[in-house]
């Protein structure tokens, strides 16, 4: 954990998010509200860059070092691409090869993964005890990796992975190693059939896309269904799961929990209770109002 007093010594904390598309991100609202509640000033800047290659990412990270950032979050599609460009990694981030939080301290950039800790918190809140029953993960990119590690860390002992790029699924299976038994599936149907739960780790369903990564007729009442997407909060997948009577976890829980953990890493301060959740809800309500008016 960083120096607990850092935020109180700093008049202004500068953070950011790199990824695309990110105009809808609730991250600025969450982090800035948490800082206000904690009694200091924070600015959170969206760095939307499409098609960034290695040289582009190196330049952005060098800017983070030079311009006084306390850190940045990283989202799709750069969670894996930034890993070899950082100075250090937490043990968990190194194991999974994906980073969503980069802390800048004295010119040193250290990668962490609060998607994993955030999803673990959200899964525990479901009160499930899936044990040996398989849980399916659809999509094994950056967030899918974090979800796999989170589930393995919370007692899920059998994971089924599906990705249109089978090599990605195999890479995650290799990284998880002995943490859980992993089955790589050749279809979404094979992954979710008989599974205790399923998680969408792809951007399918994020506006303006209105597709679902899992056909509605594959979802069962006995399952829990989670989506990492929160724009919209009720994705086509979650609407189908709700209609089927399944237990549903929206992207709200992951977004809030990962932000709580990231804020503590960036500032050394635990965000005041409810500040990040309230800001997320306000941001989402404003987005939905704009969408209805459009």
Image: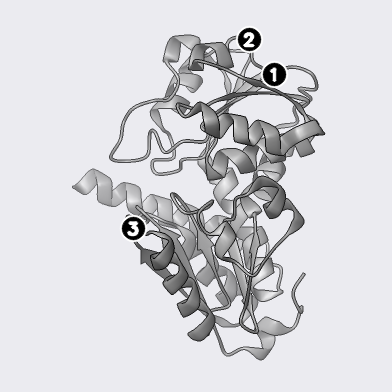
Near-viewer residue (109 or 7): 109
Q: Can residue 194 be seen at all in this image of the molecule?
A: yes
Disc ID at residue 97: none
Farthest left residue in view: 294
Tell me the residue that label 2 is attached to: 194
Sooner in the amino-acid sequence: mark 2 or mark 3: 3
Q: Secondary structure at mark 3?
A: loop
Sooner in the amino-acid sequence: mark 3 or mark 1: 3
Q: Secondary structure at mark 2?
A: loop
Give the alpha-carbon distance from disc 3 to disc 1, as whole Å. 35 Å
Residue 103 % position (x, y)? 62, 70
Residue 271 % position (x, y)? 66, 67
Tell me the residue that label 1 is attached to: 134
Tell me the residue that label 3 is attached to: 23
Question: Is 13 located above or below residue 22 in the figure?
Answer: below
Q: Residue at x 49, y 15 (%)?
A: 187
Q: Residue at x 58, y 77 (%)?
A: 70
Near-viewer residue (54 or 47): 54
């Amino acid at each position: 954990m960083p120096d607990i007093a850092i935020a109180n010594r700093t008049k202004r904390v500068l953070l950011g998010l790199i990824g695309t598309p990110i105009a809808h991100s609730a991250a600025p609202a969450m982090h800035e509200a948490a800082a206000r509640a904690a009694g200091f000033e924070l600015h959170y800047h969206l760095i939307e860059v499409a098609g960034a290659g290695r040289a582009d990412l190196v330049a952005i990270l060098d800017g983070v070092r030079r311009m006084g950032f306390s850190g940045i979050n990283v989202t799709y599609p750069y969670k894996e691409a930034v890993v070899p460009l950082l100075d250090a990694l937490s043990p968990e981030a190194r194991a999974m090869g994906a980073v969503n939080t980069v802390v800048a301290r004295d010119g040193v950039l250290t990668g962490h993964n609060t998607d994993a800790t955030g999803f673990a918190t959200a899964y525990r809140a479901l009160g499930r005890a899936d044990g040996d029953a398989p849980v399916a993960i659809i999509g094994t990119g950056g967030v899918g990796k974090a979800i796999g590690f989170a589930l393995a860390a919370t007692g899920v002992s059998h994971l089924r992975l599906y990705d249109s790029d089978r090599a990605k699924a195999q890479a995650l299976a290799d990284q998880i190693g002995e943490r859980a038994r992993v089955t790589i599936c050749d279809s979404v149907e094979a992954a979710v059939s008989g599974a205790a739960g399923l998680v969408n780790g792809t951007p399918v369903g994020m506006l303006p896309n209105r597709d679902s990564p899992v056909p509605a007729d594959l979802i069962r009442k006995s399952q829990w269904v989670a989506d990492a997407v929160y724009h919209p909060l009720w994705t086509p997948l979650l609407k189908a799961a709700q209609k089927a009577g399944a237990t549903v976890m929206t992207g709200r829980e992951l977004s809030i929990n990962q932000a709580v953990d990231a804020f503590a890493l960036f500032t050394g301060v635990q965000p005041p209770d409810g500040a990040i959740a309230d800001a997320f809800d306000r941001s989402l309500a404003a987005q939905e109002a704009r969408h209805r008016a459009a």
